[in-house]
């Protein structure tokens, strides 16, 4: 009479809700989500994993925030990844910090999930490129999230994967885009998938756009999407522009 999904990509939204409501009755159906880690919880975990006191754990959290990685602090898996990554010292630059973090976030760390995958695992480079593409589309369009498929209740500020063109040259395969939403580069909420943090989305989106520019995309065509009528960068795209 219950279903536990360890991540949003395993929850089939309205299909699962309808099946459970038929089982228990609409009046007894309830959908619950775990809250993100609080600051105190994150500090306690860092202190435990680093075998240190809470003062030094707080300093670690502040360092992560200064590096623009605060979006990775409210999820236990992501937080532990940062602790492991910084064990031998933080990366020497912001670029290397984001590159290292994204390379780790795209990996499937769960042996249970790897064991039940019906298809052969996709290469991490392929999944990263799909993430870059999805983030670039979101940022340039002003949307905030992805849905697996278009439905009547899909918000106006969301794209659905089945909205994507499938035959355009230079775009990742649809299956790769679907698979990467189940990685830690995205967080799920209510059947929608958001980049784990806006700054991560800006870094990934810039990587995809740089690749397209190097492949021959006219610079003026891209700037037409990023600049306002006054010739300045649209405020929401300043982070993306800075990475480029």
Image (cartoon, rainbow, N blue to C red):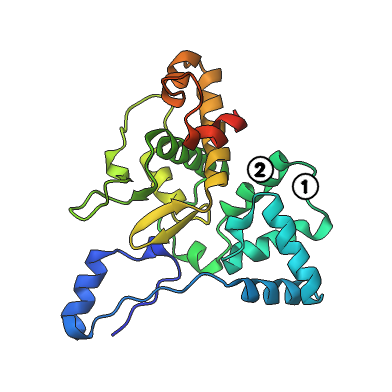
Question: Is any atom of residue 155 visible in this view?
Answer: yes
**Which one is in front, 85 or 43?**
43
Q: Which residue is painted at 81% across and 77% down in the image? A: 53
Q: Is residue 4 left or right of residue 76?
A: left
Residue 89: which quarter of the image? Answer: bottom right
Q: Position of residue 80 (x, y in %)?
A: 67, 66
Q: Residue at x 83, y 56 (%)?
A: 88
SS at badge 1: loop
Q: Is residue 191 above or below residue 234?
A: below
Whole-percent x and y of residue 216? 50, 14
Above-or-below relation of 16 to 209: below
Q: Which mark is residue 91?
A: 1
C-beta proximity under 8 Å, tags 2 and 1: yes
From the top left corner, tell me how far across and down residue 112 is, in percent: 51, 69
Please name the residue that numbered disc 2 is placed on. Answer: 99
Q: Is residue 216 above or below residue 212?
A: above
Which residue is rendered at x = 43% and y = 50% of the image? 179
Q: CA distance from mark 2 to mark 1?
A: 9 Å
- Residue 104: mark: none
| Pointer 2 local density, CA inside 10 Å: few below 14, some 14–19, many at least 20 | some
Element type at mark 2: helix
Q: Split into 4 quadrants, where in the image is the N terminus?
A: bottom left
> Looking at the image, is mark 2 or mark 1 earlier in the sequence?
1
Q: On the image, which quarter does residue 86 sit in?
A: bottom right
């Amino acid at each position: 009479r219950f279903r536990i999904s360890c991540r949003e990509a395993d929850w089939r939204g309205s299909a699962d809700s309808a099946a459970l409501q038929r089982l228990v009755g609409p009046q007894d159906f309830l959908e619950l989500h775990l809250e993100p880690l609080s600051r105190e919880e994150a500090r306690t975990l860092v202190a435990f994993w680093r075998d240190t006191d809470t003062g030094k754990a707080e300093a670690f959290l502040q360092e992560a925030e200064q590096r623009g990685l605060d979006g990775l602090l409210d999820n236990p898996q992501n937080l532990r990844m940062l602790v492991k990554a910084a064990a031998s010292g933080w990366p020497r630059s912001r670029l290397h910090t984001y590159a290292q973090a994204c390379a780790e976030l795209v990996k499937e760390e769960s042996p249970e999930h790897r064991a039940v995958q019906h298809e052969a695992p996709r290469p991490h480079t392929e999944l990263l490129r799909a993430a870059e593409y999805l983030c670039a589309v979101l940022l340039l369009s002003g949307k905030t999230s992805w849905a697996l498929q278009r439905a009547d209740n899909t918000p106006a500020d969301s794209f659905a994967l089945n909205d994507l063109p499938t035959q355009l040259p230079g775009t990742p395969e649809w299956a790769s885009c679907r698979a990467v939403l189940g990685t830690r580069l995205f967080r799920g909420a209510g059947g929608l998938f958001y980049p784990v943090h806006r700054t991560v989305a800006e870094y990934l989106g810039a990587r995809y756009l740089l690749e397209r520019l190097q492949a021959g995309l006219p610079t003026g065509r891209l700037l037409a999407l990023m600049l306002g009528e006054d010739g300045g960068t649209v405020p929401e795209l300043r982070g993306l522009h800075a990475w480029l």
